[in-house]
């Protein structure tokens, strides 16, 4: 009886020590779930979800404080991926946070720009160059299309233009079988 | 002589249709009224235009310089005047536009400087540079810059040079005719390529349905040591790079690896001929041989300047009135042209006029019955039906897992499919979607990095500002204590909530400083600050 208890207690101590060591040795810094969610989000940093950027939204989703359907730039596909990752039901994009739009980038009418720097301060991804009283311009490949620069502009010289497809970005379309309409008799 | 050839799995034998155009000698196409030369015709970076509208150019003048090592130059195909450098539609399945130089020929064919080089006296490095600047790209169809392929790989050097004269795709005969008529030039090009690659042996693979080409190439290479013309069995797609390497050497290349890493490299016969022209004659790649065939009155092969409009070229062949579409390339891998007022590019090996009799409309797509015919036909040893399911379901992760990027889009699976499924279209959709996703992912990662850096920078600036303010306050405090002053202004603050003496003194000090500024006579002591002007 006693030896058996000792053996069991001994095993428990050894295993406990191993687990304790492992929890220190293999400690994961940060929250891997937040990073995984953040990797799915489109990094537009537009704040349409109601959080100041993609990372805060990812943190809110991880804590269960936000729904997964609040990111219009990520679109339905983004919601689907989040639902897959988190084991949740797919939901259509919530209307109050906006609708999915084709990718657009900001364009500054350089003739009208007065060089106020308000847009450069608003841009979350440093995609606008320019200094005080100097003309500003958007570095189009870096622009995420968040539209945050549009409203601060005092002279309304920023427009969102759709991104044109080029030979490099063109995609083969999903093969659709042409259905022939029956000739009216 | 090789003891035996190797085989690859799968493959199909479509009707060859080579006789229509192969009995007529190559003839030069007439100079068109207008040449539209796309600035980017190869894989890699887009060349920057070196000419402007209104400028006169000589034949062979470089109008677009290679953008970096992984790119190839572009030249004026004839002498004349540049009318514009502007986006024009390309012979691309999308029908989209890209920058092109529009040249109006003056009819003089006035050559620019041509510098023939004795290749034996030049280093491989210098010759690779010459090939890049001569715009030499693979003429087999992929238009991959040749100088990049000639870089020594992990194996140290290219042991075996393979020259691809298989031309396995139906209808196309441009390589066949080139080998028959210009075998001497091809063999000189092979000598240059061999010198650059320092290859110890050369194997020229030609399908056994081209006996005349085999005889011509054997005669031209008879005096070259360790060069062998190897007739290979006629089986589509033997002309695929990986397939031909497998047949001739038995080397099977894993995914994502290139021939150079295994000491093997493969070039098309037409590429070899262009290398000969570029090095021995100093002429950059300005023209290529294009097969015009299918539903036309006069099929044949023509030497065509790059940039010639396809509709002008088709006048030589005379398409019959019931032609309903045009295919660029072969019927297996080619693309249906969205229109015909497009330029001939370096990758244009063949234009086929199609009608319902030659290329019957495919029946309606029916469900996959999992018969496995595609799997038996696939030369890349994939499972096309699985790839089809995943692509159809947009399950790109699985499609990539099942090796969709190993697919060479040869079309064997669609050729044998009893359900008429356009399998290759699904794979192309999948591949381009995966590539687009990767591009978006890279862009999102870059945006995240910039956003995080920006947040960091803003926090740092805030901290620095707070530190500066604190320093200023401390300096002001010291100044007040030093003066020991309690100005009367403090009395005005009696109605406000009681402040402690220290704060009151600071406010008083600030008010005094402001007054002093107004009067324009600085009062001592002032805290350090920027001089005020005006």
Image (tube, coloured by chain):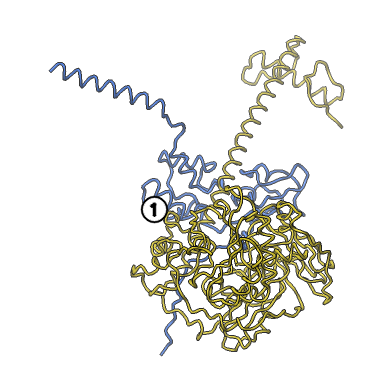
Chain colours: A blue, B yellow
- In the rendered structure, the answer to whether residue B121 lies left or right of residue B466 reads right
Percent across and percent down for residue B41 are 67, 64
Along the line of sight, the residue nearer the viewer: B162 or B40: B162
Q: Is residue B495 or residue B445 the one in the foreground?
A: B445
Point 66% across, 13% down: residue? B501
Tell me where residue A15 appears, x and y as whole percent: 29, 24
B1 vs B255, nearest the viewer = B1
Q: Quadrant of residue B189?
A: bottom right
Residue at 84% from the left image edge and 64% from the top image edge: B113
Would residue B321 be visible to someone looking at this image?
yes
Expressed as whole percent of the image width and height from the top left, the position of residue B90 reads: 65, 69
Judge whether B203 appears above or below A44 on screen: below
Q: What chain letter is assigned to the residue under label 1?
A: A
Instruction: Left or right? Give the position of B332 relative to B117.
Output: left
Badge 1 marks a residue whose secondary structure is loop
The image quadrant where one finds the N terminus of chain A is top left
Res A165 seen here: no
- Return the residue found at the far left: A1
B511 relative to B198, above or below: above
Seen from the viewer's position, the closer of residues B240 and B359 is B240
Q: Residue at x 41, y 77 (%)?
A: B364
> Where residue B478 sits in the image (x, y, percent)?
73, 13
Residue under label 1, please give it.
A90
- Where on the picture, by quarter, is residue B476? top right
């Amino acid at each position: 009886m006693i030896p058996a208890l000792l053996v069991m207690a001994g095993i428990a101590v050894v295993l406990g020590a191993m687990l304790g060591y492992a929890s220190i040795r293999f400690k994961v810094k940060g929250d891997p779930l937040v990073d995984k969610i953040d990797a799915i989000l489109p990094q537009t940093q537009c704040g349409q979800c109601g959080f100041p950027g993609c990372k805060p939204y990812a943190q809110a989703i991880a804590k269960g404080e936000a729904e997964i359907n609040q990111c219009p730039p990520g679109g339905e596909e983004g919601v689907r991926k989040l639902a897959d990752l988190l084991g949740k039901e797919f939901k259509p994009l919530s209307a109050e946070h906006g609708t999915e739009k084709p990718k657009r980038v900001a364009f500054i009418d350089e003739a009208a720009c007065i060089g106020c720097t308000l847009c450069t301060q608003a841009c979350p991804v440093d995609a606008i160059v320019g200094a005080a009283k100097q003309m500003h311009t958007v570095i189009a490949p870096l622009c995420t299309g968040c539209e945050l620069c549009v409203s601060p502009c005092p002279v309304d010289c920023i427009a969102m233009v759709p991104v044109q497809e080029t030979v490099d970005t063109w995609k083969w379309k999903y093969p659709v079988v042409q259905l022939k309409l029956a000739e009216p008799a | 002589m090789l003891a035996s050839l190797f085989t690859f799995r799968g493959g199909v034998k479509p009707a060859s249709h080579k006789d229509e155009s192969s009995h007529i000698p190559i003839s030069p196409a007439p100079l068109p009224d207008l040449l539209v030369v796309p600035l980017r015709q190869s894989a890699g970076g887009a060349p920057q235009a070196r000419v402007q509208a209104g400028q006169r150019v000589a034949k062979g003048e470089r109008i677009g310089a290679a953008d970096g090592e992984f790119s190839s130059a572009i030249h004026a195909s004839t002498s004349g005047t540049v009318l514009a450098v502007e986006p024009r539609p390309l012979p691309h399945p999308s029908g989209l536009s890209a920058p092109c130089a529009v040249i109006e020929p003056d009819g003089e064919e006035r050559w620019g400087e041509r510098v023939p080089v004795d290749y034996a006296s030049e280093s491989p490095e210098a010759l690779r540079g010459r090939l890049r600047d001569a715009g030499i790209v693979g003429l087999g169809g992929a238009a991959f810059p040749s100088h990049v392929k000639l870089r020594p790989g992990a194996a140290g050097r290219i042991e075996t040079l393979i020259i691809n004269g298989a031309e396995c795709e139906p209808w196309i005969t441009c390589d066949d005719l080139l080998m028959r008529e210009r075998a001497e030039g091809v063999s000189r090009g092979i000598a240059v390529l061999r010198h650059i690659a320092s290859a110890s042996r050369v194997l020229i693979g030609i399908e056994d349905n081209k006996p005349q080409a085999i005889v011509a190439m054997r005669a031209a290479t008879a005096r070259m040591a360790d060069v062998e013309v190897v007739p290979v069995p006629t089986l589509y797609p033997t002309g695929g790079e990986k397939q031909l390497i497998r047949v001739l050497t038995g080397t099977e290349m894993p995914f994502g690896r290139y021939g150079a890493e295994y000491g093997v490299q493969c070039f098309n016969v037409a590429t070899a001929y262009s290398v000969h022209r570029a090095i021995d004659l100093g002429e950059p790649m300005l023209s290529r041989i294009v097969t015009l065939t299918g539903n036309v009155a006069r099929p044949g092969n023509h030497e065509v300047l790059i940039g010639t409009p396809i509709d002008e070229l088709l006048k030589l062949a005379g398409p019959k009135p019931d032609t309903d579409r045009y295919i660029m390339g072969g019927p297996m891998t080619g693309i249906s042209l969205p229109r015909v007022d497009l330029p001939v590019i370096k990758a244009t090996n063949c234009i086929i006029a199609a009608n319902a009799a030659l290329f019957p409309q495919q029946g309606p797509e029916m469900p996959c019955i999992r018969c496995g015919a595609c799997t038996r036909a696939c030369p890349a040893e994939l499972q096309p039906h699985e790839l089809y399911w995943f692509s159809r379901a947009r399950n790109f992760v699985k499609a990539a897992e099942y090796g969709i990027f190993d697919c060479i889009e040869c079309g064997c699976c669609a050729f044998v499919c009893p359900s008429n499924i356009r399998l290759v279209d699904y794979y192309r959709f999948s591949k381009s979607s995966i590539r687009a996703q990767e591009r978006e992912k890279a862009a999102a990662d870059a945006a995240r990095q910039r956003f995080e850096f920006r947040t960091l920078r803003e926090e740092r600036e805030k901290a620095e500002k707070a530190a500066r303010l604190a320093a200023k306050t401390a300096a002001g405090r010291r100044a007040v204590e030093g003066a020991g002053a309690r100005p009367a202004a403090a009395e005005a603050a009696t109605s406000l909530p009681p402040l402690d003496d220290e704060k009151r003194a600071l406010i008083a000090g600030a008010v005094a400083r402001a007054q002093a500024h107004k009067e324009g006579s600085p009062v001592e002591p002032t805290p350090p600050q920027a001089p005020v002007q005006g």
